Amino acid sequence: MLLSIMVSEAKYIDESNLAKKKKESQKQLRDTVRRLDEALFGNPDRMDRELWLARLSDLVLDGVQFSAGQTPEVSDWRHAIRAGDCKIMLRGYSHVFVHSPDFDDSNAFEIAETDGCYQEVFSRKTLRDLVLAYWRDEAPNAIRNQSFDFPLTQSARVQTTDCNQAERKNGYTSSQERRQ
C-alpha cells in the first residue's frame, strides 16, 4: 500500500509582487514538507509519530469520497497507515499564478534545500490553457511542460520510504539515509 502525500502552496498575485511571493511560497512549502518529513521519518523516531500516522489515517477517512456502487476498503487503509504497514511518498508543489496581463514568463524549478519539491509559475495565458484543458477533460501535461526546462510529470524525484517500524530499523532510519 502506498500513501501519496502531496503538499501544495499557492499564490495568486500581480507581477509587481512576484519575487517576494515566490520566496514566501517556497519557504512555506519547505517548512511544511520538512515538518512532515521529520514527523514521519525523523531519526530517532519521534515520540508523536503514531499521533501523526493517526491524523493521516483520519484524513483518509474524512477525505475519501466514493459512489454508492463502490466499496473501497477505507478501514483497511486506515489500519495500515496507523500500524505503519504502508509506504509513504512525500512531495510538494508551490504554484504561483500571475494575473498581470503582460506577464508571460511561465517557468518551473526544483526548490533548493528540500527534496521532491518544485515551484511552478504560471502566466495568465498558461493558467487559462490549463483550465480549458481540465474543462475539456484533457491531461494538462503538455501545457505544464511546454514552457519548462524539464517535464515535471516525468522528472520529479520522489522519495518513497517504507513506514513499517521493523523495516525502518533494519533499513532506512532517517531522512538523510533515505536520500542517499
Image (cartoon, rainbow, N blue to C red):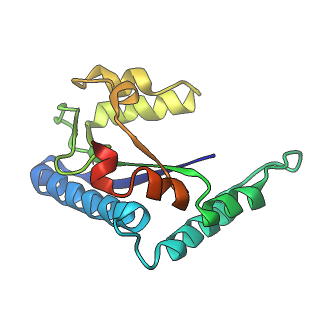
Please give the name of the residue rendered at 36% of the width and 60% of the height, measured from the top-left corner: 37
The number of numbered badges drawn on the structure is: 0
Q: Position of residue 10 (x, y in %)?
A: 33, 54
In this rendering, is residue 109 above or below 169?
above
Residue found farthest to the right = 69
In this rendering, is residue 40 above or below 111?
below
**In this image, 154 relative to 149: left or right?**
right
Q: Quadrant of residue 7?
A: bottom left
Please give the name of the residue rendered at 29% of the width and 57% of the height, measured from the top-left corner: 29
Of 64 and 158, the residue lying toward us: 158
Q: Position of residue 25 (x, y in %)?
A: 24, 57
Tell me if I can see residue 126 in this picture.
yes
Tell me if I can see residue 11 in this picture.
no
Of 164 and 15, the residue lying toward us: 164
Please give the name of the residue rendered at 84% of the width and 46% of the height, measured from the top-left corner: 70
Of 136 and 6, the residue lying toward us: 6
Q: Position of residue 47 (x, y in %)?
A: 44, 79
Q: Position of residue 140 (x, y in %)?
A: 45, 28
Residue found farthest to the front = 170
Q: Quadrant of residue 116?
A: top left
Quarter of the C terminus within the rendering: top left
Please give the name of the residue rendered at 38% of the width and 40% of the height, measured from the top-left corner: 158
**In this image, 128 relative to 89: left or right?**
left
